[in-house]
């Protein structure tokens, strides 16, 4: 099979397409012929910073396709089923071997490109708001980098929950689109001070919940913009900062701080996360929520796809199709 591989971590130019052996089917696993690959934030970080496994290494943890082989101990899937899978690596390839428990049936009216963009993004968004953020109706939230796939998912859930949503972006061209999905106030952080703007919007109170996938200075600003006894959630480090936060920033306002990694929750509370993803897939199929895909690249355009995903120009997800 052909795969998008890495022999050493680094910039997108390190990606290359190679012919490598087809994956083997584990008795408790399935083999998927991929149709679409979502480029996740974790994929970009793994490609850029490692660690990677034995070279040539196939990065990526989320893809959608059709099952072509089923392990001898698997009874809940069949050859020909349309599925989306979320696993540690191996998504950037024509074929993929995953545990059966890491795959979900795709509703018929969801495309492969949409399905490939759902599990990690939407389940993480839901956990940020409800499982760990304990968002109440009418509360105010701040979401850094709200025009990315995660931010847009958070905005949709929060809008339905009747929250007041404040988001930060780097490009004012995205403002009108964010207004359409229910974001109340948008701060262009390249032109305005985030903390000052939040104080203005909230009458100097601050937000009930701040969610930050960026890290570094953005995380510090999120803490500063949070009200007394509010909550801050760190859910990524797109800036690739060392994220050394002075905890006195939290102590001064008795702020609760959570770090969130869906993979950890999946390993400790598997059934809850599996059911959550399944419910989200059905809700998107019912048009309650929408997957926003900015751009779809061909398989042989992997370098361009990663470059675009890293440029922060996208409104939503960047996908590779096969």
Image (cartoon, rainbow, N blue to C red):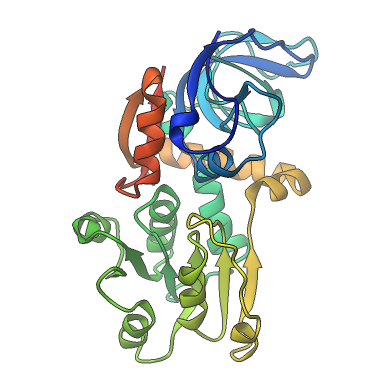
Lateral position of residue 273 relative to residue 224, left or right: right
Q: Position of residue 7 (x, y in %)?
A: 60, 25
Depth check: give the residue in front, 130 or 89: 89
Depth check: give the residue in front, 35 or 47: 47
Does residue 111 appear in this view?
no
Q: Is residue 300 above or below residue 223?
A: above
Q: Position of residue 153 (x, y in %)?
A: 42, 51
For the point 35% across and 50% down, the residue is 312
Does residue 311 appear in this view?
yes
For the point 64% across and 77% down, the residue is 256
Lateral position of residue 212 relative to residue 274, left or right: left
For the point 43% across and 64% down, the residue is 161
Q: Where is the N terminus found, in terms of image quarters?
A: top right
Q: Quadrant of residue 155?
A: bottom left
Lateral position of residue 268 relative to residue 56, left or right: right
Q: Is residue 81 above or below residue 15?
A: above
Q: Is residue 230 above or below residue 32?
A: below
Q: Position of residue 107 (x, y in %)?
A: 47, 27
Q: Is residue 57 above or below residue 48?
A: above
Q: Where is the C terminus found, in terms of image quarters?
A: top left
Depth check: give the residue in front, 206 or 103: 206
For the point 38% across and 92% down, the residue is 204
Q: Position of residue 231 (x, y in %)?
A: 57, 76
- Circle count: 0
């Amino acid at each position: 099979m052909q795969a998008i591989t890495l022999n050493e971590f680094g910039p997108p130019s390190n990606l290359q397409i190679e012919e490598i052996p087809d994956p083997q089917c584990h008795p408790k696993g399935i083999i998927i012929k991929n149709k679409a690959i979502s480029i996740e934030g974790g994929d970009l970080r793994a490609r850029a910073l490692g660690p990677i496994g034995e070279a040539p290494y196939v990065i990526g943890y989320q893809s959608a396709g059709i099952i072509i082989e089923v392990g001898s101990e698997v009874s809940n899937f069949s050859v020909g089923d349309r599925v989306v899978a979320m696993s540690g690596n191996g998504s950037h390839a024509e074929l993929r071997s995953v545990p059966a428990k890491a795959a979900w049936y795709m509703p018929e009216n969801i495309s492969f490109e949409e399905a490939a963009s759902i599990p990690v993004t939407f389940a993480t968004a839901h956990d940020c708001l409800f499982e760990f953020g304990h968002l109440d109706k009418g509360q105010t939230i701040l979401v850094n980098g709200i025009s990315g796939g995660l931010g847009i998912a958070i905005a949709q859930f929060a809008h339905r929950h009747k929250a007041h949503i404040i988001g930060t972006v780097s490009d004012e061209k995205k403002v009108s689109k964010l207004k359409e999905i229910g974001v109340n106030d948008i701060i262009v952080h390249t032109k305005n001070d985030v903390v000052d703007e939040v104080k203005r919007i909230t009458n100097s109170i601050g937000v009930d919940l701040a969610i930050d996938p960026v890290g570094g200075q953005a995380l510090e600003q999120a803490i500063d913009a949070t009200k007394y006894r509010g909550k801050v959630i760190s859910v990524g480090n797109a800036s690739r900062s060392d994220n050394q936060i002075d905890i006195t920033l939290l102590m001064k306002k008795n702020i609760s701080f959570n770090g969130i990694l869906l993979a950890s929750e999946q390993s400790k509370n598997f059934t809850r996360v599996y059911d959550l993803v399944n419910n989200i897939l059905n809700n998107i199929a019912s048009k309650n929520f929408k997957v926003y895909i900015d751009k779809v690249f061909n398989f042989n355009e992997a370098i361009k796809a990663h470059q675009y995903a890293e440029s922060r120009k996208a409104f939503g997800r960047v996908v590779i199709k096969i």
